[in-house]
Image (spheres, rainbow, N blue to C red):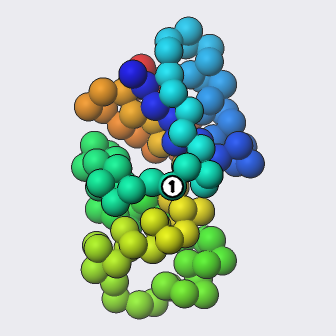
């Protein structure tokens, strides 16, 4: 089952959702700002993306700039920051079985469908 980690207030996330709707494939919408992610889920997402936790951070978010920017953080501390402040997680994230992508640019989504 395809999953999209979606923030309805984000234009790129809405564009990603539109791509999935147009594909005609079944998918699940996870509104990660409302449905708390577990550490296990977040680690699985990062693993499927094949990136470091820092690469999933939205570095222009106010909370990142005020609380974390310029600090030396371990991967675990970065994960904890994303769990505490899910707004820090880059979006949208689309997972199709063992493939995953961050939908920026949204063409990335088409590549894994």
Work out which quarter of the rendered image holds the C terminus and state it.
Answer: top left
What residue is rendered at 59% in x and 62% in y? 87
- The image shows residue 14 at horizontal and vertical percentages of 68, 36
What residue is rendered at 55% in x and 13% in y? 23
- Is residue 51 shown to the viewer in this render? no
For the residue carrying disc 1, how many other residues have a C-alpha within 10 Å: few (<14), some (14-19), or many (20+)?
some
Work out which quarter of the rendered image holds the N terminus and state it.
Answer: top left
Above/below status of 72 relative to 29: below
- Farthest residue to the top: give it: 24
What residue is rendered at 50% in x and 15% in y? 26
The residue identified by callout 1 is 36
Task: Name the one closer to the observer, 97 or 72.
Answer: 97
What residue is rendered at 45% in x and 66% in y? 83
* Quarter of image, res 63: bottom right
- The image shows residue 32 at horizontal and vertical percentages of 55, 49
Task: Name the one closer to the observer, 67 or 50.
Answer: 67
- Is residue 9 shown to the viewer in this render? yes
Above/below status of 54 relative to 21: below
* 96 relative to 103 in the view: left or right: left
Above/below status of 110 relative to 60: above
* Quarter of image, res 67: bottom right
- The image shows residue 98 at horizontal and vertical percentages of 26, 31
Query: What number of labels is visible?
Result: 1
Secondary structure beneath label 1: loop
* 70 relative to 48 in the view: left or right: right
């Amino acid at each position: 089952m395809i999953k999209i980690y979606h923030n309805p207030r984000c234009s790129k996330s809405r564009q990603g959702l539109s791509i999935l709707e147009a594909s005609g494939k079944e998918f699940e919408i996870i509104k990660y700002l409302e449905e708390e992610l577990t550490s296990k889920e977040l680690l699985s997402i990062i693993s499927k993306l094949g990136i470091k936790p820092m690469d999933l951070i939205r570095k222009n978010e106010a909370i990142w700039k005020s609380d974390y920017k310029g600090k030396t953080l371990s991967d675990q501390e970065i994960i904890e920051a994303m769990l505490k402040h899910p707004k820090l997680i880059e979006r949208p994230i689309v997972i199709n079985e063992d493939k995953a992508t961050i939908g920026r640019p949204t063409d990335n989504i088409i590549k894994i469908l």
